Image (cartoon, helix red, strand yellow):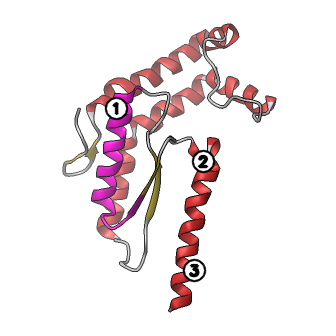
């Protein structure tokens, strides 16, 4: 496993990301194009990410449609494949227009990146997030919520809201003291 390294123009994301995550997304794209996704959904092997009693039938149908849509799967492949470009853009912005020391940065992440990924990929992505944050915003307050992943805003919004309320309350009390 490799971490993030900085060359002259890009951050290079660990090889595990590209050797395992991107090919699995490409396989989902191929599966959708070949019609295999539709068959797997009908057989109950492939399930939508968001399920349960609180999930509307419309949302379930939309997720199934997107799992079977090769163009949608292609967008996921592109997004993950070009993650280096996004990291490079943030790096350039930080270098040319750094944040004021008066600007506070808080980053809220989950304990893992995605609970559907293997644990070793989650570890790599967690390390990459921490390293990127350390390099880009060394004074940022990193808030890591235990037991949730990148879908926390949909699956567990109350944990995010609790941290946001706490940050707003701290900010308000600091402003009142001044």
The residue identified by callout 2 is 153
Q: Does the residue at mark 3 contact the one at mark 1 (Cβ under 8 Å)?
A: no
Quarter holding residue 40: top right
Identified at 59% across, 30% down, the residue is 72
Identified at 39% across, 49% down, the residue is 86
The residue identified by callout 1 is 17
Q: CA distance from mark 3 to mark 2?
A: 24 Å
The residue identified by callout 3 is 172
Task: Provide residue 27's location: percent of width, then percent of height.
Answer: 47, 17
3 or 1: tag closer to the N-terminus:
1
Task: Provide residue 146's location: percent of width, then percent of height.
Answer: 47, 45
Identified at 54% across, 14% down, the residue is 31
Quarter of the rendering occupied by the N terminus? top left
The residue lying toward the viewer, choosing from 97 and 117, is 117
As helix, strand or loop, the secondary structure at mark 2 comes to helix
Identified at 52% across, 21% down, the residue is 29
- Where is 101 relative to 140, above or below? below
1 or 2: tag closer to the N-terminus:
1
Reply yes or no: does residue 120 show up in magenta: yes
Q: CA distance from mark 1 to mark 2?
A: 23 Å
For the magenta stretch, what is the residue range?
118-142
- Where is 169 relative to 67, above or below? below
As helix, strand or loop, the secondary structure at mark 3 comes to helix
């Amino acid at each position: 496993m490799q971490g993030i390294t900085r060359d002259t123009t890009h951050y290079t994301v660990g090889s595990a990301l590209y050797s395992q995550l991107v090919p699995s997304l490409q396989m989902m794209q191929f599966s959708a194009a070949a019609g295999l996704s539709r068959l797997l959904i009908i057989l109950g092997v492939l399930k939508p990410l968001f399920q349960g009693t609180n999930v509307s039938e419309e949302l379930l149908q939309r997720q199934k449609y997107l799992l079977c849509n090769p163009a949608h799967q292609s967008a996921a492949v592109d997004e993950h494949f070009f993650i280096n470009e996004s990291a490079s853009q943030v790096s350039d912005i930080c270098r040319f227009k750094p944040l004021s020391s008066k600007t506070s940065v808080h980053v809220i992440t989950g304990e893992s990146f995605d609970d559907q990924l293997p644990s070793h990929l989650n570890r790599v992505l967690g390390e990459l997030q921490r390293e990127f944050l350390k390099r880009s915003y060394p004074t940022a307050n990193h808030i890591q919520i235990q037991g949730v992943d990148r879908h926390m805003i949909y699956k567990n919004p109350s944990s995010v809201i609790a941290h946001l309320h706490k940050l707003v309350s701290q900010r308000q009390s600091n402003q009142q003291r001044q």
